C-alpha cells in the first residue's frame, strides 16, 4: 500500500467517523426556536399560576398553581439556556474572529508607523 | 490504478445576497493530484474554494469528500477531517513570531516540536526566522509560513487561494515546487490562480471558470497558454 492510499483511506475513515449534522435537519435553528418558546411559555405559565392562586381560596388549587409556577420558571431557565447556547455561540465566534482581525490590523498599523518613523529619522531637515 | 477522489463538487450553485455566482460548478480532485482553477476576476474561483472548505453555503448541488456527501457541514468539521484552506493574503498573524504562528496550530493535537519539525524540514528558512515577527518576513516567506501552518494540520485536501499574489516569479516557482511535493505525498490540491503560467507547470489538469461555470478543462502543455489566453478574452480556442 502506498502512502497516497494510506492518507486517502485515513481521510475516508475519519470522515465516516465524523458526526456531521444533517444540514436539512437544521437542528440549531430548531433548538433556538424551542428555547424562545420555552422562555415565553414559562413566563406565561408563571403569570397564569399567580392569577389562578389569587382567584381561589382552595389551598389545593393554590398548591397546584405553585407547582405550575415553579415548572414555568424552570422552563424559562432551560429555554434561556438553550437560547443563549444557540444564539451567543455564533456571535462569540464572530467576536473572537473580529478580535483577531483587529489585532492583526493594529499590528499592521504599528509596523507601518515604525517604518514611517524610520524614514523620518533619516531626514536631515530640522523638526 | 485510479487514485481516490477526495474532493468533488457536483453541479454546485452558490451566491451572495440573491446573486448567483457559481452556476453549476462540477470538478473533482483525486489524492495526489494538483488541479488548477483558473479564470478572470469575478469568475467565482474564491467562492468555489470557500464552498469546498464549507465556509460558504451551497444553494444547490453537492459537496463530497472521499465519496461522502458533506454538503452543509460546518467548516470546523471539515477542517477537523482534513480540509485546509490557505486564503488569499496568506493568513498569518503578523504580530506573532514565526514560532508562535506555528504554535497556534497545536490545536490540531500535534505537539509543538512535531509541527516545527514539519515546517522547518519543508521550509528551512523559517527555522532561521523562528523568532522574527511574521509581519516582518518577506512575502514569499509569509506564504511559506502559511503553507507550513496548513501542513501542520496534516491535510488530505489542500485549498490554495492565489498563492502567487504579490510575489516575484522566482519565489512563486519555488512555492509551487513545494506544492507539487505536498501533492506527491497523497494530498489532493486545488489551487485557485489568476496567473495561469505559475501553476500550469505543476497542475495535472486545469479548469477554467468563466462567469460561474467551468467553461473549459485543459491539460497543461505547451499549447495550453494560447488556449487560456483565448478563453480569458472570451473567444473559443
Image (cartoon, coloured by chain):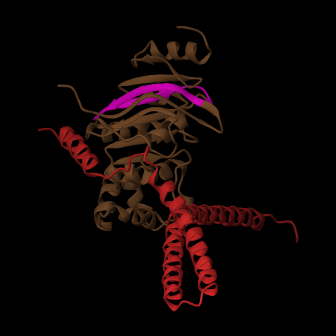
Q: Is residue B202 visible?
A: no
Q: Is residue B62 magenta?
A: no
Residue at position x 29%, y 67% in the image: B111
Q: Colour of chain B?
A: brown
The chain coloured red is A
Q: Is residue B125 above or below residue B199?
A: below
Residue at position x 34%, y 61% in the image: B108
Magenta range: B21-42
Task: List the single residue furthest toward the right.
Answer: A126
Q: Is residue B25 magenta?
A: yes
Task: List the single residue furthest toward the left.
Answer: A1
Residue at position x 50%, y 72% in the image: A81
Q: Is residue A19 above or below residue A123?
A: above
Residue A42 x, y percent position in the rendering: 55, 73
Residue A43 x, y percent position in the rendering: 60, 75
Tell me the quarter of the image containing the N terminus of chain B: top left
Residue at position x 56%, y 47% in the image: B89
Q: Is residue A87 visible?
A: yes
- Which SS type dominates the magenta stretch? strand
Of residue B212 and residue B152, the one placed in the foreground of this image is B212
Residue B180 x, y percent position in the rendering: 34, 36
Residue A123 x, y percent position in the rendering: 80, 64
Q: Is residue B150 above or below residue B14?
A: below
Of residue B176 and residue A32, the one placed in the foreground of this image is A32
Amino acid at each position: 500500500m502506498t502512502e497516497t492510499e494510506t492518507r486517502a483511506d485515513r481521510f475516508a475513515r475519519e470522515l465516516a467517523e465524523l458526526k456531521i449534522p444533517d444540514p436539512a435537519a437544521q437542528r440549531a435553528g430548531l433548538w433556538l426556536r424551542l428555547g424562545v418558546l420555552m422562555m415565553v411559555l414559562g413566563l406565561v405559565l408563571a403569570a397564569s399560576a399567580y392569577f389562578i392562586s389569587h382567584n381561589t381560596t382552595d389551598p389545593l388549587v393554590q398548591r397546584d398553581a405553585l407547582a405550575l409556577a415553579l415548572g414555568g420558571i424552570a422552563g424559562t431557565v432551560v429555554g434561556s439556556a438553550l437560547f443563549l447556547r444557540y444564539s451567543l455561540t455564533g456571535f462569540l465566534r464572530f467576536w473572537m474572529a473580529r478580535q483577531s482581525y483587529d489585532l492583526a490590523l493594529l499590528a499592521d498599523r504599528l509596523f507601518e508607523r515604525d517604518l514611517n518613523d524610520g524614514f523620518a529619522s533619516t531626514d536631515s531637515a530640522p523638526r | 490504478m485510479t487514485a481516490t477522489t477526495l474532493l468533488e463538487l457536483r453541479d454546485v450553485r452558490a451566491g451572495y445576497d440573491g446573486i448567483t455566482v457559481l452556476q453549476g460548478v462540477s470538478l473533482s480532485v483525486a489524492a495526489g493530484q494538483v488541479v488548477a482553477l483558473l479564470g478572470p476576476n469575478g469568475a467565482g474561483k474564491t467562492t468555489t474554494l470557500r464552498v469546498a472548505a464549507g465556509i460558504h453555503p451551497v444553494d444547490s448541488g453537492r459537496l463530497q469528500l472521499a465519496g461522502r456527501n458533506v454538503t452543509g457541514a460546518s467548516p470546523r468539521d471539515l477542517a477537523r477531517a482534513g480540509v485546509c484552506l490557505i486564503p488569499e493574503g496568506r493568513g498569518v498573524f503578523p504580530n506573532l513570531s514565526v514560532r508562535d504562528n506555528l504554535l497556534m496550530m497545536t490545536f490540531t493535537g500535534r505537539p509543538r516540536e512535531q509541527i516545527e519539525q514539519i515546517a522547518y524540514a519543508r521550509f528551512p528558512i523559517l527555522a532561521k526566522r523562528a523568532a522574527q515577527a511574521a509581519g516582518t518576513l518577506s512575502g514569499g516567506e509569509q506564504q511559506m509560513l502559511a503553507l507550513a501552518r496548513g501542513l501542520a494540520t496534516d491535510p488530505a485536501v489542500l485549498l490554495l487561494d492565489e498563492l502567487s499574489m504579490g510575489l516575484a516569479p522566482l519565489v512563486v516557482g519555488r512555492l509551487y515546487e513545494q506544492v507539487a511535493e505536498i501533492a506527491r505525498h497523497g494530498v489532493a490540491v486545488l489551487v485557485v490562480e489568476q496567473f495561469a503560467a505559475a501553476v500550469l507547470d505543476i497542475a495535472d489538469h486545469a479548469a477554467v471558470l468563466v462567469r460561474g461555470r467551468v467553461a473549459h478543462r485543459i491539460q497543461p502543455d505547451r499549447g495550453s497558454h494560447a488556449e487560456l489566453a483565448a478563453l480569458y478574452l472570451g473567444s473559443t480556442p
